[in-house]
Image (cartoon, rainbow, N blue to C red):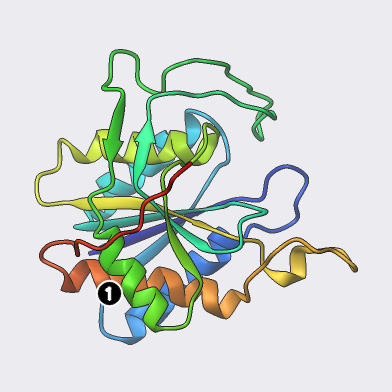
Amino acid sequence: MILLTGFEPFGGESTNPSWTAARVAAARLRAEGLDAQAVELPCVFGDSIRALEEALDQYRPELVVCAGQAGGRSRVSLERIAINCDDARIPDNAGKAPVDEPVVPGGPAAYFSSLPVKAALAALTAAGIPAEVSQTAGTYVCNHLFYGLMHALRLRPGSRGGFVHVPYEPAQLPPGSTDPSLPLEQLAEALAVVVRSALAAAADLKIAAGATH
């Protein structure tokens, strides 16, 4: 079973492309004969992880792909690592703004994604979708959820998961904006490609996709 998640709108936005893309991607995967479900999560520290854990208990997925919005990025970002740190520049949707607090007290400093991020990168590039391997998921609710996911999956042998950041979709941008965006069709297909890559890859590819800064 495959679980995709996206977030509710935050920061004054009326939509969040991560949720729209997750919902469309799940429907697309079901049309291909795969058992896939999409769940919308609150953009709230703590509550997002609790809602995710409820979905993990309900669906018992073997593969989890969580998505979030990264406004300003121009590519679909395959997140490599989640860190045990909450440091909010803006409040979440419940007004919480933790600073320098652990996601899980006493937890490890970081978790790596168990998705084949480089195989997914190659597949996305072949599909003509701008993509990258990202070395940081930030310190806001997206990283918080990513860390919480990997912390939960350590107790679920055989389950894999990770996090993908998506850019704005064009409809979110005001007239004249120069912020980068990608069409919803590409965002949804990107999440579906990540799922297909994870199902197909027994091991990740060893290709360069690092960063110098």
Q: Residue furthest bottom?
A: 32
Nearer the observer, 51 or 167: 167
Q: Position of residue 166 (x, y in %)?
A: 54, 60
In the rendered view, tell whether residue 10 sits above or below residue 193.
Answer: above
**Residue 39 placement, left or right of 151:** right
The image quadrant that residue 78 belongs to is bottom left
Nearer the observer, 101 or 43: 101
Residue found 61% across the figure and 56% down from its top = 73
Q: Position of residue 43 (x, y in %)?
A: 58, 40
**Residue 184 placement, left or right of 14:** left
Residue found 18% across the figure and 61% down from its top = 204
Quarter of the N terminus within the rendering: bottom left
The image quadrant that residue 104 belongs to is top left
Q: Amino acid at mark 1?
A: Arg
Q: Position of residue 200 (x, y in %)?
A: 17, 74
Q: Position of residue 112 (x, y in %)?
A: 27, 41
The residue that disc 1 covers is 196
**Residue 136 placement, left or right of 34:** right
Nearer the observer, 165 or 6: 165
Question: SS for tag 1?
Answer: helix
Residue found 37% across the figure and 37% down from its top = 82
**Residue 150 placement, left or right of 185:** left
In the rendered view, tell whether residue 96 sits above or below residue 24.
Answer: above
Instruction: Please rate how many residues cluster around mark 1, counting C-alpha atoms within 10 Å: few if below 14, some from 14 to 19, many from 20.
Output: some
Residue found 34% across the figure and 78% down from its top = 29
On the question of residue 149 being in view, the answer is yes
